[in-house]
Amino acid sequence: MARTPAPGTRRRILETSARLFGEQGVRAVGMQQVIDATGVGKSLLYREFAGKDELVAAWLRESDAQWWEQAERVTAPHSGDPVRQILALMEFLHDSVQEPDFHGCVFYNTSSEFRDPGHPGRREAKLHLQALRDWLRDKGALAGAGDPDGMADALMLVIGGLLANGEVLGVRGPARMAPATAELIVRQYCPDTAVAPPVA
């Protein structure tokens, strides 16, 4: 008789996978390692996820949803002020680099591990980064940027540099310049918009 997954099995698998993938990288973690770490049987794991690619994609979709929930939490207090929302998001990203369990951006990391554009992990990572760029572009347009696409691209370069340098050199390295650099970019593209000081 087939075993019925206990309530929370999928959640436990995803949480454990998130920890392992974050600490070791996706390619370094095998399905047997996930089985051993979660304590679920092989059949239960494969009942929830047909294979590793499906598990990686599900993990990134959940990571994306959690990331946007956090982004909404830090930007919602500045509703109606797109410039302040952009800078609040940058401060949030800067703060995330200081977390003790920060091992780099899971989306950039996964994308670098899988070069095939058709790989589910790379596709999910790309969707997240495209959504972030779109968000920055839309906020730039609302703020009156003359070239919201250019502004979004410049900010994406800062974000990528912040996350990459923060993981390798720490928040006291080049990453420390990210919030101020983002503010300079916003001032350049939105010269007629007042840049409010950060909320203490």
Image (cartoon, rainbow, N blue to C red):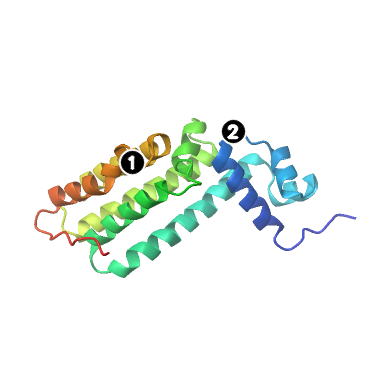
Q: Is residue 104 visible?
A: yes
Q: CA distance from mark 1 to mark 2?
A: 29 Å
Label 2's element?
Answer: loop
Where's residue 54, x and y in %?
62, 45
Vertical position of residue 53 compared to residue 134: above or below: above
* Residue 35 picture quarter: top right
Where's residue 53, x and y in %?
61, 40
Q: Residue furthest left?
A: 192
Kind of residue sitting beneath label 2? Arg
Vertical position of residue 131 compared to residue 80: above or below: above
Query: Which of the pair 171/24 is nearer the observer?
Result: 171
Q: Which residue is mark 1?
A: 172
Q: Is residue 13 left or right of residue 132?
A: right
Where's residue 42, x and y in %?
78, 44
Residue at image position (26%, 64%) is: 199
Q: Is residue 179 left or right of residue 66?
A: left
Where's residue 1, x and y in %?
90, 55
Q: Residue furthest right?
A: 1
Residue at image position (29%, 42%) is: 158
| Dot placed on the residue nearer the N-terminal end, 1 or 2 | 2
Q: Quadrant of the C terminus?
A: bottom left
Vertical position of residue 142 compared to residue 30: above or below: below
Q: Is residue 146 visible?
A: no
Kind of residue sitting beneath label 1? Arg
Q: Residues within 10 Å of mark 1 (few under 14, many from 20)?
A: few
Q: Which mark is residue 189?
A: none
Q: Is residue 118 left or right of residue 84?
A: right
Label 1's element?
Answer: loop
Q: Nearer the viewer, mark 1 or mark 2?
A: 1
Q: Which residue is mark 2?
A: 27
Residue at image position (77%, 61%) is: 6
